[in-house]
Amino acid sequence: MIPTNSSGTTNGCDNISSNCVVWQGPDITCIDLCTGDTISEVTAKIAKKVCDLIANGVASNPSLTGLNLACLNVAGKDPTELVPVLQAMVNQICTNSGSSGGSSSSLLARRTQTTDDLPIMTLPACMQYNDANGNPVTELRLDLFASLIANQVCTNLASISIINSTLTSYSSRLDVLEACVLPCSGAIAEVQIIPTCVSNVGQLTNVSVVVLALENAYCTLVGGTGTVAQMNLAISQTTLTSASPTRSNASATYSSVAGWNSAPTTLAQTIQNAWVVLDDLYNAVGEIQTNCCASGCASVVFAYTTASSTGSNGLIDSINFNFSGSTIPNTFNDTAGFTQLTLTDALGASLSTTVSVSSLQTSSSGYAFPTGSLNTQQDVSVSVNFSVTDGVDTCTADRTNIVTGVVPCPTNILATAISGTDVTVTFTNMLGTTATYVIDIVDASNVVIATTTLNNPVSGVSETLTGLTAGTPYNIRVTTTFGGASTVCPTYAFITSSGAAPCTNGMDVAFIIDYTSSMSGEIEAIKTGVASIIQTIDTASGSNNYRLSLVTADEGGGTSSVPSYNTSTDYLALPSAQRIINTGIGNRQFITAWEMFQDNNNTTFTTQLNLLNSGAPTAGVPMGQGNGIPEPTDMALGQVIEASFTNAFRSNVAKYCIIITDAAAGGNDDVFNATDYARLGSLTTTALNEGVKVFVLGSGTSQTYVNAGVTVYPWREISINTGGNWNVSETPTVIQNEIIAGCS
């Protein structure tokens, strides 16, 4: 069925197409009826089934041959035709129900048959039901089964009638809708309303016109507000939650504010939350405006710090004033003649100047006030008289403090020419002849063993003190007096010589070479002059009574690295005990014994020395890599004198360690610090106890370290304190001269 154009109604109902009404009852398989079929399909299927019944039933009188109907007592007839059989069924039903009909003999026969003799029929699932007691009924006697079917057919016919009537109504209504394409035209009469905000406000207007106006208004609204998806996205952008603190009361959260939506899902709720936040901010800003900012002198803060600065001689030459702690509003300027700074020394001399605090408050470098001729060895009094004005208010304040005086210690304090009983103390005097120095030699109990006082000292002080005990640790203590003030300088440690055996008793000489890449030139020079060096040792030892050893110190970056010569066959040929790979802090140290102490081992020592810096990894030993500076030569020294790394030193012979390096000692962490300085002190003690003289040659002897404010030369200290010597050069000639000097 297709929609009709009829404008009429049926029984007061609007017409609608049968294609628009669906069957919502259960599936009925016998007529292929399914839930959701349109009424058009329902009607067509029922009609077809009725036509089939008519065609195959009464009209065509189908053959019943083979059908056993003996129980129906069809007299004188074979059960081959439908009509006699149906009649017999009707007669049987009437007999069972007590109705009259048929001959008296057949009626009597039928009456003798009871309902209990009728077959039991299984109900299809769609017709099963519950009885009055709620029990499910799935089977019925034939007569009851037939009655149930008849009732169901009547019900279906009534429903079909109603459906047909409804379809007719829907068809008529569809005719109206199809004729009306907004705006409606023709003879169709539209409903009219009075719009209040769109199109013809206050006037009767066709619904179609109002609908179009509403669509336009809606589209405009969406264009201004965004789509629902866009609104939801905007809602999700909020970063404030119920747990966020309010700005007007830091101890409260927004969850405590009336009107706050903890989980906004609409634009209206989000806007409401925004108003809550705006009100909170409004109140917070009002509080700030009322209470935050002082006015007049209450807004001015005066503050400063001082720090002394020393010149090349160690004396204070200026005092720096930093006013960054002050707050001077931009409406204020320094009063004329102010702010005034005054320095006064212990003798009553003073200096004054004026500065602009309003300008200096933003300066990180501050103002340096030269001390001139003031006595800065004693404390200096500082006075700051602040004064600023905005033309109405003048704000003032007086502040004072003390800058501690400084008496500098001399630089480069060293113990030289150490013997078993004497020591020569040297240092540089930067204060001129008016200074006074007291030099004390104190023992471990801080008892003064030797002392001397220097008045009118020269610039290069050199004083020898005697009366010491051999092999004993001491400290040099220098007290400086200058400008009426005194200071006790940090002590300098040394150990008197233990009286090493003379070279003519024999010599054990260990060469420790910094084997990092920067040392290749020095190594080549030593290789060139090795014959002369060994000849000097041979002669000094009383002829043919010497032993030599050769150790290199190298390092590499990372705790998993190996030496750059790790594939060298000459390196790998060494016993593992002669190849130390130490895992340090952030890097590794490689300490290698190439030659062990052996009697008169000129030949093997020279052979091993010539392997160094020889190029290809498999044909020699390339230079080590290093990992910046310093280098672990101090670790190599410790292995030689503490762990007998190249065999133990002999007794009663001259014992030398000759270190050749261009860098400071680096220990296991590639830096020189207080730990390394203390380690060199410990090695000094060990060397003295063992009678080992340490010679340090190369530019590494120029490396400095500041110990307790005093600049020292660590390599020079250990060489001098052990009775050896140092030199910034490491040429073969220098090595020979140092050996000869050590022996003499």
Image (cartoon, rainbow, N blue to C red):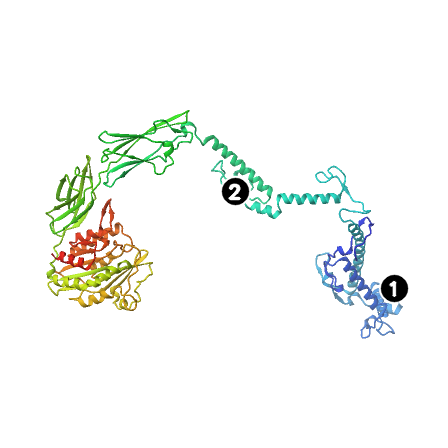
Question: Which residue does the numbered mark 2 point to in the structure image?
Answer: 242
* Image quarter hosting the C terminus: bottom left
- Quadrant in the picture for the N terminus: bottom right
Image-based side of 518 in relation to 360, left or right? left
| Label 1 sits on residue | 100
Q: Determine crowd level at label 1: few under 14, some 14-19, many 20+ residues with C-alpha closer than 10 A.
A: few
Q: Looking at the image, how many numbered discs can be counted on the residues?
A: 2
Pick the front one: 129 or 83: 83
**Which amino acid, by three-letter code, is at mark 2?**
Ser
Residue 424, numbered circle:
none
Picture coordinates of residue 225 (x, y %)? 62, 43
Image location of residue 239, percent across then percent down: 52, 44
Residue 328 vertical position relative to residue 222 in the rendered view, above or below:
above
Q: Residue at x 14, y 40 (%)?
A: 454
Q: Earlier in the sequence, mark 2 or mark 1?
A: 1
Q: Is residue 460 in sight in this rendering?
A: yes
* Of 710 and 625, the residue lying toward us: 625
**Secondary structure beneath label 1:** loop
Amino acid type at circle 1 is Ser
**Residue 123 visible in the displayed image:** no
Residue 524, horizontal then vertical, whole percent: 24, 62
Viewer-side residue, 377 vs 14: 377
Residue 509 as seen in the image, left or right of residue 47 = left
Furthest-top residue in this view = 392
